[in-house]
Image: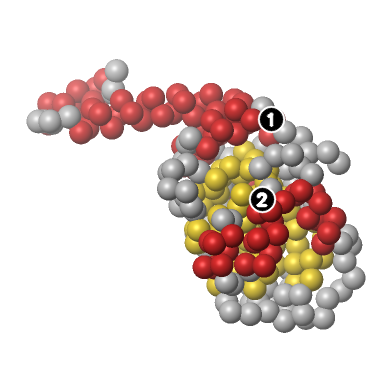
Amino acid sequence: MPLKTVAPEILEGLAEFDSATVQNAAAIVYGGYISEHIDYSGPDLNPYLYDLDGSGRATVGYAMTSTWTPLHEPVPEVSGRHDYMDSIAYANAPTIVVQQDIDLPPRRGAIIGDGMAYQMVALGAVGAVTDGNARDVPGIKKAGLALWATGRVPGHGPFNMIDHGVPVEVAGLRILPGDILVCDGDGVTRVPVDQAEDILKQGHEVREREGKTFAYFSKPGFTLDDWENYKANGVG
């Protein structure tokens, strides 16, 4: 199925916000907070590599989902690894590799390393979000792939990709193929493609309101009268 995308400027706009601002904006679009399981990642997702270019921008791209087993003799693949890499290569858009370790036990061996990272970057991936372990993290950094994972280990056993283009769960967040992900030091916020433009618009409003609040509480000589005024009137 072809990747459903938004205008590039919408992705660029989302990258200007942090994941928390996007989550706040999404709550407004949804008309109230939604389940965290379809909204943002849990605290066991570690931001190992982010802001690699020092710009302070979030990593934003389309989720390319996959499932992996790093410990035991591989079962037959539903679809081949080259097919998965092709989905990255021919997306014609920035992509984020999303991996879930479905082995038993999960999160014991590594399911991403520097060799894979070099391939993924060459094919157009800008980041990897992994429910499982990474290894060779310095090498992944050299490859230029931003990385979020639930752990690190030095090795793996028999290793296989089982399927791709399927719903997965990463650190308590359910991610669907093609979802837009906004990733930074706090973790990952999920943006459904159909809501991306509205969430971007609300992001600007969230930033404006927060800017006024920050300025109000950081003004020189803040007094208790200012506090009482805030309680009565808010920030104009």
For badge 2, the amino acid type reads: Ala
In the picture, measured across the screen, residue 71 lies left or right of residue 228, that is right
- For this view, does 43 lie left or right of residue 93? left
Image location of residue 199, percent across then percent down: 57, 29
Which residue is at a point 54% across and 62% down the rendered structure image? 142
The scheme the figure's colours follow is secondary structure
Q: Nearer the viewer, residue 67 or 6?
A: 6
Tag 2, which secondary structure? strand
Q: Please tell me which residue is depicted at 70% across the width and 59% down the height of the picture.
A: 119
Residue placed at 56% from the left, 67% from the top? Answer: 139
Residue nearer the viewer, 176 or 88:
88
Mark 2 / mark 1, whichever is N-terminal: 1
Spatial CA distance of label 2 from label 1 is 17 Å
Quarter of the view holding residue 235: top left
Q: Nearer the viewer, mark 2 or mark 1?
A: 2
Q: According to the image, label 1 marks what residue?
A: 6
Question: Which residue is nearer to you in this view: 48 or 199?
Answer: 48
Q: Is residue 137 above or below residue 129?
A: below
Which residue is denoted by mark 2 in the rendering?
A: 125
Residue 99 visible to an observer of this rendering = no
Please state the horizontal and vertical placement of residue 54, each as a whole percent of the image: 43, 48
In the image, 28 versus 133, the foreground residue is: 133
Disc 1 residue type (three-letter): Val
Could you tell me residue 198's position as x and y percent? 59, 25
The disc at residue 114 is none
Whether the residues at callouts 2 and 1 have beta carbons within 8 Å, the answer is no
Image coordinates for residue 46, horizontal then vertical, percent: 51, 61
Which residue is located at x 82 percent, y 62 percent?
81
How busy is the neighbourhood of tag 1: few (under 14 within 10 Å), some, or many (20 plus)? some
Answer above or below: position of 97 versus 139: above
Q: Secondary structure at mark 1?
A: loop
Q: Is residue 60 visible?
A: yes
